[in-house]
Image: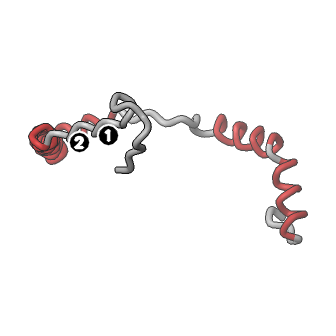
Amino acid sequence: MVSITRLPPSIHSQQKPQASKPAAVVNNTQSAVIASGVSKLATSPDVILNARANIQYDQPEGINREALDSYLGVMHQNKRDELSNLVGVDLYA
């Protein structure tokens, strides 16, 4: 640390407090307890089957999905054209 002799002692920077290491040990043990609980849940076949049954997808199914793909294709046509002009090859032909 550099000190300037003409400054009053109250202006000198004070040392930062040291971080306590026992708090870090507590966090590690808590994360280990949580991880072990999650691993026990993940190995249970009933929990896995139940979670798989409750999966919800963002996209519709069947003909509605085809309609959404067509709509998004029209919506992103300008971006595809700019990309093909930039590369020089028609990537989406």
**Residue 71, above or below 82:** above
Seen in the image, is 2 located left or right of residue 17? right
Please tell me which residue is depicted at 82% across the width and 50% down the height of the picture.
Answer: 79
* Location of residue 68 (image quadrant): top right
**Residue 15, above or below 78:** above
Secondary element under disc 2, as helix, strand or loop, is helix
Q: Which mark is residue 24?
A: none
Q: Residues within 10 Å of mark 2 (few under 14, many from 20)?
A: few
Relative depth, front residue between 24 and 55: 24
Please tell me which residue is depicted at 43% across the width and 38% down the height of the picture.
Answer: 6
Where does the image place residue 71, in percent across and percent down from the top left? 77, 38
* Location of residue 25 (image quadrant): top left
Relative depth, front residue between 49 and 91: 91
* Location of residue 88 (image quadrant): bottom right
Residue placed furthest toward the top: 10
| Residue where numbered disc 2 is placed | 48
| Residue where numbered disc 1 is placed | 52
Relative depth, front residue between 39 and 54: 39
Are dots 1 and 2 in contact, CB under 8 Å? yes
